[in-house]
């Protein structure tokens, strides 16, 4: 059973600080890694994707991937109240016939 | 560019009744997905279509759920009869291609309450 694990939170971070969200996955040969943001009552929206080991930066967001440790993280710098949401980690398989697996999500709350 | 369209937005039914959801993906997207998201959980794939063929329906409760994607464009998901545990948000998503590296675009979802 392929799994994606996330701490459900809530994670409370002061405004302006760095929020760090973590995700581990069980399928060692996974190839693609995604972070989706889901506001309460809304649908998920892709904010970051990463495919290679290391860091990928996009504005205030940085995704970090360590395939050896089967670990992917999302850093949000200069956290804003608008970043308060649930962040879903999703992992894509190597086999194109296998499905993308979502974690349960981490609730992030930015304290004004 | 229009996004993924879903309807209805909300639905309340009693157990043992039937319900249907509709989805129209982004134009040109070959792959369409139906996900079930129970409160506090991540989305769980129910069925994946590639054009009008089924790629994965391993987690679809086939005794009560059915889905079709005629002509490879829009899709319907049906539940008959509904159970209390079917209360969830049903999300439709689409992607340009097929495979684990595809970025998914989600519709607004249908919130189903089974009483």
Image (tube, coloured by chain):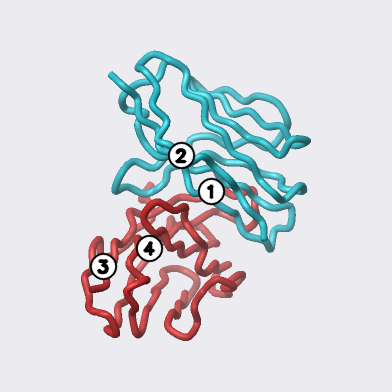
Contact check, label 1 and label 3, Cβ < 8 Å: no
Tell me whether circle 2 and circle 3 mark residues in contact (CB < 8 Å).
no
Marks 1 & 4, CB-CB < 8 Å contact? no
Secondary element at tag 4? strand
Are there few (<14), some (14-19), or many (20+) residues within 10 Å of tag 2?
Answer: many
Residue A18: percent from the left, percent from the top? 47, 18
Q: Give the CA distance from mark 2 to mark 3.
A: 24 Å
**Letter of the chain that mark 4 sits on in the rendering:** B
Residue under label 3: B113
Residue ID at (29%, 61%): B111
The chain whose colour is cyan is A
Same chain for marks 4 and 3? yes
Q: Which mark is residue B82?
A: none
Q: Colour of chain B?
A: red
Q: Which element is circle 2 on?
A: strand
Q: Position of residue A5 (x, y in %)?
A: 58, 45
Q: CA distance from mark 1 to mark 3?
A: 23 Å
Which part of the image, by quadrant, shows the C terminus of chain B? bottom left
Which of pointers 1 and 4 indicates the residue nearer the eye?
Answer: 1
A111 to B107, vertically: above or below: above
Q: Which numbered dot is residue B90?
A: 4
Image location (x, y in percent) of residue A87: 45, 39
Using the image, name the chain to which the residue with label 2 belongs.
A
Residue B46 screen position, x and y as percent: 50, 68
**Circle on res. A103:** 1
- Same chain for labels 1 and 2? Say yes or no: yes
Q: Residue at x 36, y 84 (%)?
A: B80
- The answer to the question of whether label 1 and label 2 lie on touching residues, with beta carbons closer than 8 A, is yes
Residues at marks 1 and 2, CA–CA distance in whole angstroms: 9 Å
């Amino acid at each position: 059973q392929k799994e994606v694990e996330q701490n459900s939170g809530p994670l409370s971070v002061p405004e302006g600080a760095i929020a760090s969200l973590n995700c581990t996955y069980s399928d060692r040969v996974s190839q693609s890694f995604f972070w989706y943001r889901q506001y309460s009552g809304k649908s998920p929206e892709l904010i970051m994707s990463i495919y290679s080991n290391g860091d990928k930066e996009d504005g205030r967001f940085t995704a970090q991937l360590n395939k050896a440790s089967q670990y992917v993280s999302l850093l949000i710098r200069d956290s804003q109240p608008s970043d308060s949401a649930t962040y879903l980690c999703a992992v894509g398989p190597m086999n194109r016939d296998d499905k993308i697996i979502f974690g349960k999500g981490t609730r992030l709350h930015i304290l004004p | 560019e229009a996004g993924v369209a879903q309807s209805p937005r909300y639905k309340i039914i009693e157990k043992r009744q039937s319900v249907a959801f509709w989805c129209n993906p982004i134009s040109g997207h070959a792959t369409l997905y139906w996900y079930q998201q129970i409160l506090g959980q991540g989305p769980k794939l129910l069925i994946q279509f590639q054009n009008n063929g089924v790629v994965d329906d391993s987690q679809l409760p086939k005794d009560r759920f059915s889905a079709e994607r005629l002509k490879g464009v829009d899709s319907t998901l049906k539940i008959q009869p509904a159970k209390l545990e079917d209360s969830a948000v049903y999300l439709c998503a689409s992607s340009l291609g097929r495979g684990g590296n595809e970025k998914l675009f989600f519709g607004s979802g249908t919130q189903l309450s089974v009483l």
